[in-house]
Image (spheres, rainbow, N blue to C red):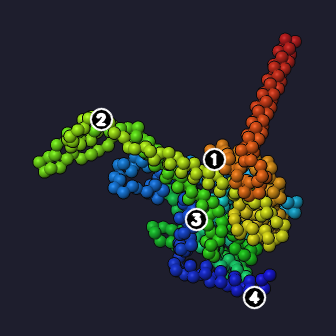
Amino acid sequence: MPTASGERTAADAAVAANANDAAAVSSDTPNVETEAYKRMKARSKKCRDLMEGVEAIRRGGTEYLPTYPGEGTTRYDARRTIAALFNGYKATVRASVGLLLQSPPVLGKDMPAALVTLWENVDAIGTHGDVFAKHLATAGTVDGLAGILTEYPRVTLTNVDFSKASLAAREAVAKGETLDAADEEALGLRPYFILVKSDNVVLPLYQSVNGRKTLVMLVIRETATERVGRFGFASVTRYRVYTLNASKVTYELWTETNGSVAITEGPTVMRNLTAIPWSPMAVGEEIKPGEFVPPLMDLAELNLTHHRIQTGVLSLEERAFIPTLVRIGAQPDQNGVYPQITLGPGDTIEAPAMPGVAEPIYWTSPPVDVLEPGMKSLETCKAEMGAMGMNFLAPDPRAAETATANRADNTAQRASIITVGRALKDCLESAFGFAGQYIKQTAGTVTINNEFEKLTLDAQTMSAYAALSAEGFPKIHIVKALQAGGRVDPDVDPQQIVDEWEDRLAEIELKKRVDARVEADRLAAEGRAVGQAAAQQGGTA
């Protein structure tokens, strides 16, 4: 068990590494980018482009589809246009978030009523907490890091309508005094959550305070849209700067204009807070202080490899489908230069005269004997993707050790859907904690899919299998991945499991159709009964 001095030394080392990274881009303005930030942003871009789909991958050009030696721009653009994408990465992310949140988060009975009401509109712009949690879980799974910034409205004489508050409210604001509870309620003031993605977290700066790693500064970049004229608009980049100093948290807003950044609001002291209201959701592995790798980064890279192989196969097939005419007997020009060779159905390859050629005119196509090994490579790649996805969705049950230390060790070894669930729970509880500080109430607990935590996952495992197989992953490899993770009996023939599960899924689908038909018949019968009753009533009248 580590000693207190050992923990302090580790914290100091982590803080030093974080500070050294930030010092490389020292600046008097908040628009800084550490090397860790740049590396994380590059990784996230790949994952986000896969989530967007084939259009983003095509738009990425040579980043995802390298050029061939000697390949011209025209030919490359044609190959990039037909680029295909089997999106196993997106399927895995959607399946994992869907499984994790198929039972919505539950606020504990120990959560104060004032905070429970936040869940109906958690971000103050109409988003229900269940939807917010889904967006947060997706962002964390894709980027490896996301989080919640818990805020409270800053009231000034110009940004609030005081008509619903008491006469003393305006005077209190003018003097910088705190409004009473009645006026805050009348003005609709209450805490709210802001979902922050990894590329918005420009600088989380930690220092050792009393031997504990403490967030002393946080810079969040955001892009807002402002009106220009009656119908125009422009994007404006702003930086939220939070600073902890002597147990007080101050806030500043900086705005970027024509390449320069200047402070436009604050600094103001944030009410009732003793820590910066940042609740990170760290899902990925932290390879350096503050630098996280997306948990499905290897799957993303493998998916891009599959994309390159598949596009190459399609490109070869396309060229094979459009042969080029060859004519023997071409003559060089006066400089001894033969006609340039171009490929396509409207072109002809003019070849020099060769004795003994039986066919002076014929069609030629690229050799397609590489298609078979290419298809095998595609299937192998797809099978590996399915195994990676299944390992994430159905991790080894041994990761569910009850001892806290064992749980932490197993989680650190391999991220999984359970890791996402734990991080989501911690993040939400932390955010509610800050919301409670604003209104001086102690926040309660949040439960995320307890059945998943206990790994009683029969139904969820079947759902994961159905989701991945529907996306085209080889069924046999999905089952083998489940067996390797201890989710399914390894001594049973995988094909037997596939057959049994396919029969079960067919039964479920059939039952759904029968139930839907029964419900439709019931509604139709009710409709006829209502119609007959109305007709009888009309006849009586």
Task: Tell us which disc is closer to us: 1 or 3.
Answer: 1
Q: Position of residue 60 (x, y in %)?
A: 47, 55
**Which residue is the site of mark 2?**
362
Q: Amino acid at mark 1?
A: Phe
Q: Measure how far apart labels 4 and 2 are at the Cα level.
A: 83 Å
- Residue position marked by numbered label 3 in the rendering: 199
Q: Which residue is mark 4?
A: 5
Mark 3 against mark 4, which lies toward the viewer? 4
Q: Is residue 386 above or below residue 440?
A: above
User: Nearer the observer, disc 1 or disc 4?
Assistant: 1
Seen from the viewer's position, the closer of residues 209 and 424 is 424
| Residue 531 shows up from this direction | yes
Q: CA distance from mark 1 to mark 3?
A: 31 Å
Locate residue 390 relative to residue 488 in the image: left or right: left
Q: How many marks?
A: 4
Tell whether 304 sits left or right of 440.
left
Q: Closer to us: mark 1 or mark 2?
A: 2
Give percent across and percent down for residue 332.
16, 46
Look at the numbered disc 3 and give the secondary structure of its residue: helix
